[in-house]
Image (cartoon, helix red, strand yellow):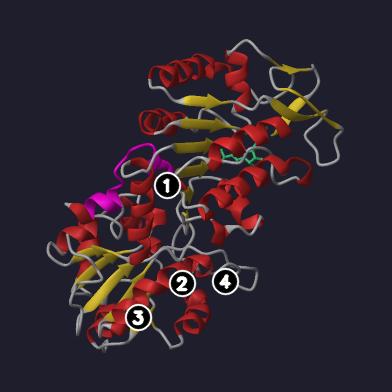
């Protein structure tokens, strides 16, 4: 496989699939440029090596080619971040794009219009992918956020560059993060899994069990496990259909010598509200009419002890309803312990769910090893799937 750092790209045109699916405000200005900034290292690397860059992305979910979804809205932000004026093709394929691409000089950047103006993109249409491919000499995939989709620009296009396809730097980092948690991990390995529902985490739990030493469970999914163990969960969130599954996971964990840490205590509330009455109770004995919305102080301390001894940590899903300040403490303290463990040399990956939002709210991005840029793509990777966008480069 070719590596972008070693690839001789001088004088060549690289078409990069980026994820510029950014939020826009009412005046169509970029309101969060994180995804654009995440693509800069790859773009700048190619430009600095004497190549030229063609950027392609989707933006939102257009039905046809509505102006609201035009990538031209991001040009001012992109120009400012790159420190140069990018060219723009009003159509991602066709004569104008071909002409602009063929006239592109080393050091220049061309942005193509929204790929999803064509239905062929999401259908993975081969002819459409071929037209995109005809614009460039080299294909770079740096869009981890869409790597779990087998679309024309994320996977199908790769076949037209058998010897000139590679991952961008962002994609390399995401893959390395997953590798360091799942395959090349240093033991002990802890996975902190939270969030609302156990049903959405079954695939991850099953894939992780053979690879980890400790499973720290929090969030709404706690109560399905507690009920499966015969505990009283009051009005807490429970998925009754998944009680057998929760039991099975606990049995498998035992067989594989994985310790499961369920929160021994919880912050319970009399309603789902910021200003509800709250108290701390044993998680297996929640009174009727009360619901668990955060892990309690003993649970925090137990998780902290395990995390501080861990060499590899995955953080997927909050420990409580962290969006409400009354129930943010568990998530915040656990995140704090992950940051401390990281400072002591552990590798920590935050990804695949609302734990990314939590880390951003607590402003801890710089204190963990890596924060993933891909929600669904990270979830599927943690489930053990090889994503189409990654497979297409490896093939
Ligand atoms: P996920 O997308 O699965 O990571 O779930 C994240 C959501 O789970 C967040 O919006 C939290 O507010 C919610 N959540 C966390 N703990 C609980 C809980 N104990 N009860 C209900 N919802 C929760």
Does the magenta segment cover residue 263?
no
Q: Is residue 234 visible?
A: yes
The residue under the point 49% across, 14% down is 244
Q: Mark 1 or mark 4: which comes first in sequence?
A: 4
Q: Are the residues tagged 3 and 1 within 8 Å (C-beta)? A: no
The residue under the point 21% across, 59% down is 158
Distance from disc 1 to disc 4, alpha carbons, whole Å, reads 24 Å
Distance from disc 1 to disc 2, alpha carbons, whole Å, reads 25 Å
Image coordinates for residue 376, horizontal then vertical, percent? 44, 46
Tag count: 4
Q: Are the residues tagged 1 and 4 within 8 Å (C-beta)? A: no
- The residue under label 2 is 71
Distance from disc 3 to disc 2, alpha carbons, whole Å, reads 12 Å
Is residue 271 shown left or right of residue 230?
right
Distance from disc 4 to disc 3, alpha carbons, whole Å, reads 19 Å
Q: Which mark is residue 30?
A: 4
Q: Mark 1 or mark 2: which comes first in sequence?
A: 2
Q: Mark 4 or mark 3: which comes first in sequence?
A: 4
Q: Secondary structure at mark 2?
A: helix
Residue mark closest to the camera, 1 vs 4: 1
Q: Residue furthest top?
A: 230
What residue span does the magenta drawing correspond to? Answer: 378-392
- The residue under label 3 is 110
- The residue under label 1 is 378
Q: Secondary structure at mark 1?
A: helix
């Amino acid at each position: 496989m070719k590596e972008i750092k070693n690839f001789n790209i001088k004088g060549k045109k690289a078409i990069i699939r980026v994820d510029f699916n950014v939020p826009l405000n009412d005046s169509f200005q970029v309101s969060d440029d994180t995804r654009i900034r995440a693509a800069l290292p790859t773009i700048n690397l190619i430009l600095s090596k004497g190549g030229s860059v063609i950027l392609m992305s989707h933006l939102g979910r257009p039905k046809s080619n509505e102006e609201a979804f035009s990538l031209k809205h991001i040009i001012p932000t992109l120009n400012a971040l790159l420190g140069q004026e990018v060219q723009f093709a009003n159509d991602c394929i066709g004569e104008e794009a071909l002409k602009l691409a063929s006239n592109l000089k080393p050091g220049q950047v061309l942005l193509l219009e929204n790929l999803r103006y064509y239905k062929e993109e999401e259908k993975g249409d081969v002819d459409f992918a071929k037209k995109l491919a005809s614009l460039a000499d080299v294909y770079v995939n740096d869009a981890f956020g869409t790597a779990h989709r087998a679309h024309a620009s994320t996977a199908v296009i790769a076949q037209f560059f058998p010897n000139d396809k590679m991952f961008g730097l962002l994609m390399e980092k995401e893959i390395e993060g997953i590798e360091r948690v799942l395959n090349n991990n240093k033991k002990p390995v802890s996975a902190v899994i939270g969030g609302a529902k156990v049903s959405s985490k079954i695939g991850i739990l099953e894939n992780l069990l053979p690879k980890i030493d400790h499973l720290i469970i929090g969030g709404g999914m706690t109560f399905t496990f507690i009920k499966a163990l015969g505990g009283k969960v009051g009005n807490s969130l429970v998925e009754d259909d998944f009680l057998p599954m929760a039991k099975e996971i606990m049995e498998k964990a035992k067989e594989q010598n994985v310790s499961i840490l369920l929160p021994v205590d919880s912050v319970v509330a009399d309603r789902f509200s910021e200003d509800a009455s709250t108290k701390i109770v044993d998680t297996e004995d929640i009174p009727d009419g009360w619901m668990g919305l955060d892990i309690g102080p003993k649970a925090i301390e137990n998780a902290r002890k395990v995390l501080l001894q861990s060499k590899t940590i995955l953080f997927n899903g909050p420990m409580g309803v962290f969006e409400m300040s009354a129930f943010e403490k568990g998530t915040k303290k656990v995140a704090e312990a992950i940051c401390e463990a990281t400072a002591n040399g552990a590798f920590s990956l935050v990804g695949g769910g609302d734990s990314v939002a939590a880390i951003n709210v607590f402003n801890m991005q710089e204190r963990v090893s890596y924060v993933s840029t891909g929600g669904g793509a990270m979830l599927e990777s943690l489930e053990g799937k090889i994503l189409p966008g990654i497979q297409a480069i490896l093939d």
